[in-house]
Amino acid sequence: MIPRYSRQKMTAVWSQENKYRKWLDVEVAACEAMVKLGKVPSEAVENIKAKAVINVDRIDEIEKVTKHDVIAFVSSLTEVIGEDGRFIHMGLTSSDVLDTALAVQLKEAAEILLDDLDELLAVLKRRAFEHKNTVMIGRSHGIHAEPITFGLKMALWYQEMQRNRERLLRAKETVSYGKIAGAVGTFAFIEPFVEDYVCKKLGLSPAPVSSQIVQRDRHAEYFTTLAIIASSLDKFAQEVRLLQRTEVREAEEYFSPGQKGSSAMPHKRNPVLSENISGLSRLIRSYALAALEDVALWHERDISHSSVERIIGPDATVTLDFMLGRFTGLMDKLVVYPERMLANLNMTHGVIFSQMVLLALIEKGTTREDAYAIVQKNAMQAWHEGIEFRKLLEQDETVQKYLKAKDLEGIFNVNNFLTNLDFIFKRVFG
């Protein structure tokens, strides 16, 4: 049973309530650190913890006047805390709070996506072993090449998603950095100890050096990683769409009872889930471009990145979470047609064995050029006239000088292409 995608968890990460809660975590941790430095009374911090309440509506009211979200946030806390509220945000700049909290949110989002990837990997592995020996034609340039198995295709996807998981782990690490270093990163009005304390408490590392902000190359790596994952899903979804084409019909999305494919044509069964995934991947890639644009800011900081991140942070992670859940469900229920795969494999009258014949002729002593010409001539005739390739070879006097009927019988065996299947699976799955 595939768990429902975790979009509710992901949207909770980006809720206003959670965002302000993370801001408060930063502020409280900074106060705790300053208690240890003897700059804030311990009773004041206890009072702050006891009285601090997140009131989103009140913050919005104050922001309408201040036109500054962090000031509105701090003011709302001061209203309910009272005199001890003066210790909140002491020596900090807005980006100390914003960037450190954002790092926590991005880390939380990555952890949800990692769980999504694990669910997809489990399904791909199951389908790979289920269809390890389900023979189908491999295609290059969209044209029949040589036999593979559907399980091998799934193993390829599994390995790619393993790499994506490793990329996301690295990106999570890269973005899990905070800063409490003041207006231009010099610690002019706050001790470095505060930064160390806050980051450690929130599960982050302190940025070794910062300006007013944590540098946006970190975020660009994160969102580019999401785009790579989305592009892999696009690749897989596109393959499903190609395999579901009427002329191919080797696999198709599960079509549930009562589902409709077209308002005009009752016979239609369309790959709508895959098409949806391909479309959404374009959005994720555009968010990566936006994150790359955020790397170049003026001097120690400008605010041009802020509006971008308010959109791409929630949208990219929520969308990818949805895409991963959707594709996991799609692959879990994907309908595979082995008989159709064999029929398609045989539709080219055996020309898929051309390389094997070529190599056999070379081994028997012909030059590569002569062997290629002989094989190509017969293959093209088989292709154009619909005659079995093997039959033409058996009638070719030049071929018969080198290859007898018994030789051709051994050549025209699809299992010849799959002798290293176990080796590949062991290398992929261990």
Image (spheres, rainbow, N blue to C red):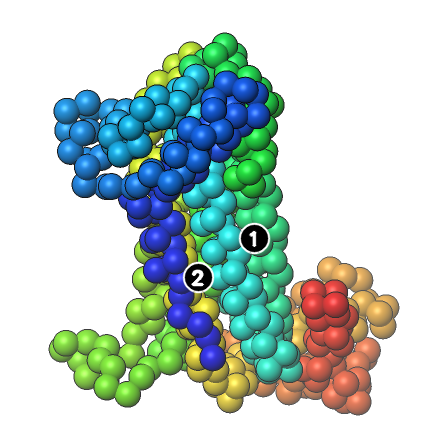
Residue tagged 1:
164
Of the pair 367 and 302, the residue shown nearer to us? 302
Farthest top residue? Answer: 188
From where the camera sits, is residue 324 visible?
A: yes
Q: Please identify the quadrant where the C terminus is shown.
A: bottom right
Label 1, secondary structure: give it.
helix
How far across and down, in percent of the image, does residue 160 sit? Answer: 58, 58
Give the residue type at disc 2.
Leu
Q: CA distance from mark 2 to mark 1?
A: 12 Å
Residues at discs 2 and 1 in contact (Cβ within 8 Å): no
- Lateral position of residue 158 relative to residue 278, left or right: right
Image position of 211 with respect to 233: above or below? above
How far across and down, in percent of the image, does residue 102 sit? Answer: 42, 37
How far across and down, in percent of the image, does residue 81 sit? Answer: 31, 32
Q: Which mark, residue 324?
A: 2
Of the pair 123 and 420, the residue shown nearer to us? 123
